[in-house]
């Protein structure tokens, strides 16, 4: 039971720790969309924050899909209404830390299982 709990915690850590939101200024949004083609962008407007999936830029309008409780809808947001943005970006350092932690904890569980089973290590 403890092994399952530890495994669930490690999986949750690895999913949460491998990417972060990279902030963008208003001036960086359009070039980032055309050069990096992110799969998601978070846009901050004066009254709300909107996350677009598969964003594209058409003239001065940001287009993409927004997920709502009732389903997916296509959104078009004028760039002049956006104050700032952020894109999802892989965090290589955190990914390595999490991977190292997973290996270390796995080895500790394996060693603990061997020591408590009475099996002799050659």
Image (cartoon, rainbow, N blue to C red):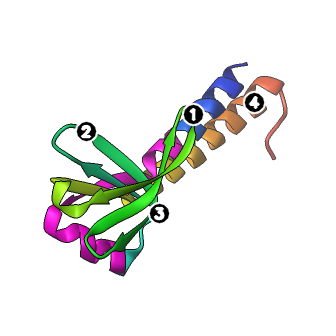
Task: Give neighbour class at mark 1: few <14, some 14-19, many 20+ (Cα, 10 Å).
Answer: few
* Residue 79 percent across, percent down from the top left: 22, 62
Q: Tell me if 118 is positioned left or right of 25 in this view.
A: right
Give the Cα distance between marks 4 and 1: 47 Å
Mark closer to the chain start, 4 or 3: 3
* Residue 5 forms part of the magenta stretch: no
Residue wearing tag 1:
70
Left or right, residue 71 beside residue 31 = right
First in sequence: mark 2 vs mark 1: 2
Instruction: Indicate which label's residue lies in the foreground, 3 or 2.
Output: 2
Q: Earlier in the sequence, mark 4 or mark 2?
A: 2
Q: Residue at x 43, y 51 (%)?
A: 97
| Label annotation for residue 113 | 4
Q: What segment is highlighted magenta in the picture? A: 13-34
Say which residue appears at 34% left-offset and 45% top-offset: 50
Q: Which mark is residue 54?
A: none
**What residue sits right under mark 2 in the picture?**
48
Q: Is residue 61 above or below residue 84?
A: below
Q: Nearer the viewer, mark 4 or mark 3?
A: 3
When asked about the image quadrant of residue 36, the answer is bottom left
Residue 89 on image: x %, y %: 38, 61
Quarter of the figure that contains the N terminus? top right
- Residue at 67% over, 20% down: 2
Estimate the spatial distance between the alpha carbons at disc 4 and disc 2, rounded to whole Å: 51 Å
Tell me the element at label 1: loop
Given this view, does label 4 or label 1 mark the residue nearer the observer? 1
- The residue wearing badge 3 is 39
- What is the CA distance from the residue labelled 3 to the residue labelled 2? 20 Å
Asked if the residue at tag 1 contacts the one at tag 2, i.e. Cβ–Cβ closer than 8 Å, the answer is no
Secondary structure type for disc 2 = loop
């Amino acid at each position: 039971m403890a092994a399952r709990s530890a495994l669930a915690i490690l999986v949750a850590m690895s999913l949460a720790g491998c990417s972060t939101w990279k902030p963008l200024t208003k001036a960086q949004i359009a070039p980032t969309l055309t050069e990096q083609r992110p799969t998601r962008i978070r846009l901050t407007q004066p009254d709300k924050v909107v996350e677009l999936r598969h964003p594209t830029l058409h003239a001065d309008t940001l287009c993409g899909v927004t997920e709502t409780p009732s389903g997916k809808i296509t959104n078009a947001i004028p760039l002049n209404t956006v104050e700032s943005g952020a894109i999802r970006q892989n965090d290589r350092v955190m990914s390595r830390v999490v991977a190292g932690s997973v290996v270390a904890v796995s080895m500790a569980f394996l060693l603990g299982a061997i020591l408590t089973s009475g099996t002799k290590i050659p």
